[in-house]
Amino acid sequence: QSVLTQPPSVSGAPGQRVTISCTGSSSNIGAGFDVHWYQQLPGTAPQLLISDNTNRPSGVPDRFSGSKSGTSASLAITGLQAEDEADYYCQSYDSSLSGRVFGGGTKLTVL
Amino acid sequence: QLQLQESGPGLVKPSETLSLTCTVSGGSISSSTYYWGWIRQPPGKGLEWIGSVSYSGSTYYNPSLKSRVTISVDMSKNQFSLKVSSVTAADTAVYYCARHRSVTRDAFDIWGQGTMVAVSS
């Protein structure tokens, strides 16, 4: 059971918009700790996709965006492309556990 | 461009100690700006942060693994290392090393490619 809760899977057709939620609690996201998102393409290492809730590192398309409110965060992907099919993970810090925590991951399928 | 590369045995026997090294190239591990961490991913499962170390050797660990984990830094070799003692099959995973800027904030911005470690007799 992960400290941060993500839906196991989401799907969408090419060109559509999908969102992935990341639900935490008052000791992590709700405490003001930033949320980061990673994309893991099949058979590869995770790569930073969104940092500090909303920031896109250089090279990340603006089709990807992040938001945070209360004890939750979301990743939105617009204009879905086949190459977006991957696993997505959120990550934050938990003050009760005194450590960095990940969500369980969400598998995105492009139909 | 900074790169990280994990290395170590791909097979470890139960009850023994797993030892991995992460070599940093294209930059110095001795920067006070960064922490150096280990993350693992069991086959078909999600990511788990193991722990991190600063250039000065300050460490902090995942409480669930703390009793079995040691992370250290060797500035002369531009490397940092992970040891997990008393391993079981549950420690079978791909192990990644990664960089981050602070203890509580900031993302893992650069990752190694990962190395698979199987625990089996």
Image (tube, coloured by chain):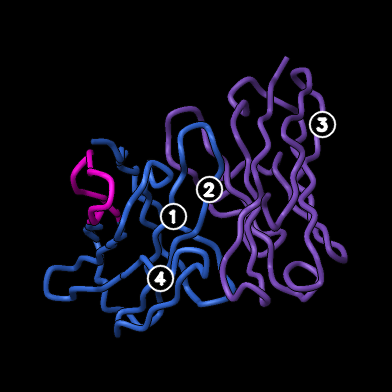
Whether callout 1 and callout 3 share a subunit is answered no
Task: Please state which of the two labelled residues, at mark 1 or mark 4, is closer to the viewer.
Answer: 4
* Amino acid beneath label 3: Arg
- Asked whether A38 falls inside the magenta stretch, the response is no
The residue lying toward the viewer, choosing from B82 and A29, is B82
Q: Residue at x 57, y 41 (%)?
A: A39
Q: Which residue is mark 4?
A: B67
Measuring from the top left, give residue B13's x and y in whole percent. Answer: 23, 43
Measuring from the top left, give residue B68's x and y in whole percent. Answer: 36, 65
Measuring from the top left, give residue B1's x and y in whole percent. Answer: 30, 56
Q: Give the answer, above or below, for where B111 lies relative to A52.
A: above
Find out whether the residues at labels 1 and 2 contact each other: C-beta distance under 8 Å: yes
Rounded to the nearest angstrom, the CA distance separating label 4 from label 3 is 44 Å
Q: Which residue is mark 2?
A: B47
The residue lying toward the viewer, choosing from B68 and B93, is B68
Tell me what hue chain A is rendered in.
purple
- Asked whether B7 falls inside the magenta stretch, the response is yes
Crowd band around label 1 with a 10 angstrom C-alpha radius: few (<14), some (14–19), many (20+): some
Q: Earlier in the sequence, mark 2 or mark 4?
A: 2
Rounded to the nearest angstrom, the CA distance separating label 1 from label 4 is 16 Å
Residue interval drawn in magenta: B3-19
Q: Residue at x 40, y 79 (%)?
A: B33
Rounded to the nearest angstrom, the CA distance separating label 2 from label 4 is 20 Å
Q: Residue at x 28, y 45 (%)?
A: B14
Q: Which residue is mark 1?
A: B39
